[in-house]
Structures are given as structure tokens and as C-alpha cells.
Image (spheres, helix red, strand yellow):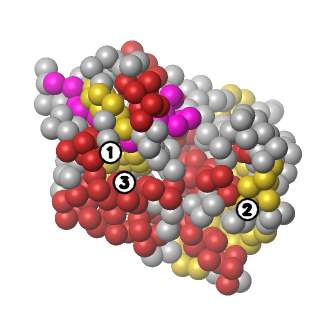
């Protein structure tokens, strides 16, 4: 059996805890170094991971045991940190979005290709039993040919719970760039790539008020649209209507529904790995649950990185940089369409990732591949 694959983590904010719950102690990988602008935070994280060092970013990128850098910095730093890791000959797995702008994302993947390294990107929630079971049902013809879909995300905004929500309202943030990757990545897995979009956007107010933590009551500026709607034209011919909003309270709409010639499929929240998939047949008696038939069971943040580590020439990473670039293309095209008032054709296309077979938790949590 090979040695565990060495991971270095840059950025130890809120989301890092979820990743560490999966990665720390997993036999396929070993967290060997962590870095953060707040050295004390890096030290505190390292103290909870046997064998991990708290180091500077420069030292982490040079660390001889780091093969892949997990980039959990804020969106504005994604391109810089990921690019530096690639320059150092490391693979990269980055939190969503891939980068703030599409040109940055394109340049990053071109850089990785030239360097001969891999790029993966969140979200990996789409590899769980929720989205993957829905995909298996669609691919099995359960609702016939898919004709249309809807995807809806409505919340009052992350400043209500996040103690430092500034980046959610800066370039690279907003409901589309922050939450859109979950929904759009799921739609790419379900219906395939998108060829063009039409978008509209609005901004409810110029400032937001932090609702928790030591900065309670502080106002922060809003620099991005906080409600974005659009239509995605999939290459297969299906149309998806998409709504992402930080300006509403809640919604009773299904997170994702796919409508076909013989029925409708209700897909669970793509922000989670699992959830109930429901099916309504054209002449059926009512909604019924589709039992899990695909995906990583009981998956958690970081399964996409493990999937990337285990990928090879015959099976590319499923939460790949190519998918993330296409999703970024879709999102930035929607914002451009909204600003310019026109239909925008995409410049990227991507193959649907390989489906995830139904994989029990004990299998993906205990796999060590030869060679690391």
C-alpha cells in the first residue's frame, strides 16, 4: 500500500473545520502543513492534527511532503494562492468559486495544464447520494427526455450568522457567485453543459448589518447584485430557470426540479450531500421517494479532494477544475447578460463528470490507493 497523499491547507476560516473532519485521519491523505494570515489560528489548527505543522504560505508551498494544496482562502485570493501552488508544482483543490473572474479561471487552468498538475474545485456536495441518485434516475429514463428545470435559492443574507461576512458582498461574492456553484454544478451533473444564458440582477440596498459576533451591528458595503435570476440553455436542449437571492426570507420552492415528458423529479438541496429524491409520474398516484442508488454515502466536505487524489488517466476528477471553469463561465455570463441586457453565449463546454456508483461510507472513508 502506498503512503498517504500529502495535503497542505491554506486558509483556516469557518469552512476549514468541515474539511478537517473528513481529511484529518483519512488513510488516503495526510494533512502535513497548514497556513493562515492569522498565525495563531494556524497554530491552533495544527495542534488538533497529529503530525501537522503550522507554517507560512511560502513554506507550505515549498514543503517537500505537500503534493496538493487545499485553498480555503476568500474568493479574492483564490487565483493568487492557487497560481502560486501550481508554480510550485503542486496540485490544487480550491473552494468555490474557482476564481473571481473568468479570465483568471481560464489562465489558472492553462497554467495547470502547462505545469502538468491537477486542479479540483468545490462544491463536492454534488457527489453525494442526493444529486447522484437524481442523475441515475434521469439517466435511467425515469421521467423520459428532460425538457426543463428550475433551481431556487432564497435567503436573507449571510451577514445574519457569519461574524465576518464582508467577502460575501465584495466581487466574487453575492448569492450567485457564493451559492450558485452548488446549484449550477448539480445542473451540469444532471443535464450537462450550458451553451448560453440570459440574466437579470438587482441590488436591494447599499449596506448590510452584521448580526452576530464581535462586530455585531457594524455596517458593511454591498458591491455586488444581491438577487440574480436567469435562464440557462443546456446543450441538450433543456432550459433551466435559476434564482439566487440574498434579498428574501425563505421559499417553499424545491431547490431543484427537473421536468420531463413522462414525469418530474424533485432534487434535494445541492448544498447538502444527501436528501430525498422524489418522483411524480405523469399518470402516477402521487409523489414517491427514489431510494439512493448512486453517490458517496454519508459524504462530507473533502470527498471531492479524495476523489481527485484517486483519479487517474481512465477516470478524471469529478469535482474538476474544468467543471468549475464552466460553472464560472455560466455565472459571469449571467452577470454580464444582466448588465448588458442581452443573451450571452458561453466560451466553454465540458463533459458531464463520470457518475459516482453507490459507494458505502466505509468504502470511501477507508480507501488507500497504491502510490498515494
Which residue position holds label 2? 222
Please report whichever mark, 1 or 3, sits nearer to the chain's N-terminal start.
1
Q: Which mark is residue 180?
A: none
- Dot 2 lies on which element? loop
Classify 10 Å Cα crowding around label 1: few (below 14), some (14-19), many (20 and above): many
Classify 10 Å Cα crowding around label 2: few (below 14), some (14-19), many (20 and above): many
- Label 2, label 3: how far apart the Cα atoms are: 25 Å
Give how far across and how far down residue 243 sits, in percent. 73, 58
Check if residue 267 falls in the magenta segment: no
- Dot 3 lies on which element? helix
Q: Residue at x 80, y 64 (%)?
A: 206
In depth, the one of 226 and 354 nearer the eye is 226
Please report whichever mark, 2 or 3, sits nearer to the chain's N-terminal start.
3
**Contact (Cβ within 8 Å) of mark 1 with mark 3:** yes
- Label 1, label 3: how far apart the Cα atoms are: 9 Å
Please report whichever mark, 2 or 1, sits nearer to the chain's N-terminal start.
1
Q: Is residue 130 visible?
A: no
- Which image quadrant is residue 359 in? top left
Q: What quarter of the picture does the C terminus occupy?
A: top left
Q: Residue at x 61, y 53 (%)?
A: 167
Which residue position holds label 3? 81
Amino acid at each position: 500500500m502506498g503512503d498517504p497523499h500529502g495535503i497542505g491547507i491554506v486558509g483556516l476560516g469557518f469552512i476549514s473545520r468541515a474539511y478537517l473532519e473528513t481529511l484529518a485521519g483519512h488513510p488516503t491523505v495526510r494533512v502535513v502543513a497548514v497556513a493562515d494570515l492569522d498565525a495563531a489560528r494556524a497554530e491552533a489548527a495544527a495542534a488538533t492534527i497529529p503530525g501537522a505543522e503550522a507554517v507560512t504560505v511560502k513554506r507550505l508551498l515549498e514543503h517537500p511532503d505537500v503534493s496538493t494544496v487545499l485553498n480555503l482562502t476568500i474568493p479574492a485570493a483564490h487565483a493568487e494562492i492557487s497560481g502560486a501552488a501550481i508554480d510550485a508544482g503542486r496540485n490544487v483543490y480550491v473552494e468555490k468559486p474557482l476564481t473571481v473572474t473568468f479570465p483568471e479561471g481560464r489562465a489558472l487552468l492553462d497554467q495547470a495544464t502547462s505545469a502538468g498538475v491537477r486542479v479540483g474545485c468545490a462544491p463536492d456536495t454534488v457527489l453525494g447520494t442526493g444529486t447522484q441518485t437524481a442523475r441515475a434516475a434521469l439517466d435511467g429514463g425515469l421521467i423520459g427526455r428532460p425538457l426543463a428545470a428550475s433551481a431556487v435559492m432564497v435567503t436573507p443574507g449571510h451577514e445574519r450568522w457569519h461574524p465576518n461576512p464582508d467577502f460575501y458582498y465584495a466581487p466574487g461574492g453575492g448569492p450567485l457567485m457564493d451559492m450558485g456553484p452548488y446549484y449550477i454544478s448539480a445542473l451540469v451533473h444532471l443535464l450537462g453543459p450550458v451553451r448560453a444564458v440570459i440574466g437579470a440582477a438587482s441590488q436591494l440596498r447599499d449596506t448590510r448589518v452584521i448580526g452576530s459576533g464581535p462586530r455585531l451591528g457594524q455596517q458593511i458595503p454591498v458591491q455586488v447584485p444581491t438577487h440574480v435570476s436567469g435562464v440557462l440553455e443546456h446543450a441538450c436542449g433543456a432550459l433551466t430557470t435559476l434564482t439566487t437571492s440574498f434579498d428574501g426570507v425563505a421559499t417553499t420552492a424545491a431547490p431543484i426540479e427537473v421536468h420531463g415528458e413522462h414525469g418530474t423529479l424533485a432534487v434535494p438541496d445541492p448544498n447538502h450531500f444527501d436528501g430525498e429524491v422524489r418522483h411524480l409520474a405523469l399518470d402516477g398516484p402521487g409523489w414517491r421517494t427514489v431510494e439512493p442508488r448512486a453517490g458517496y454515502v454519508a459524504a462530507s466536505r473533502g470527498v471531492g479532494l479524495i476523489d481527485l487524489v484517486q483519479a487517474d488517466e481512465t477516470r478524471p476528477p469529478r469535482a474538476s477544475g474544468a467543471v468549475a471553469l464552466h460553472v464560472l463561465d455560466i455565472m459571469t455570463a449571467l452577470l454580464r447578460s444582466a448588465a448588458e441586457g442581452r443573451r450571452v453565449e458561453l466560451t466553454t463546454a465540458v463533459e458531464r463528470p463520470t457518475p459516482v456508483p453507490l459507494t458505502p461510507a466505509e468504502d470511501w472513508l477507508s480507501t488507500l490507493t497504491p502510490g498515494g
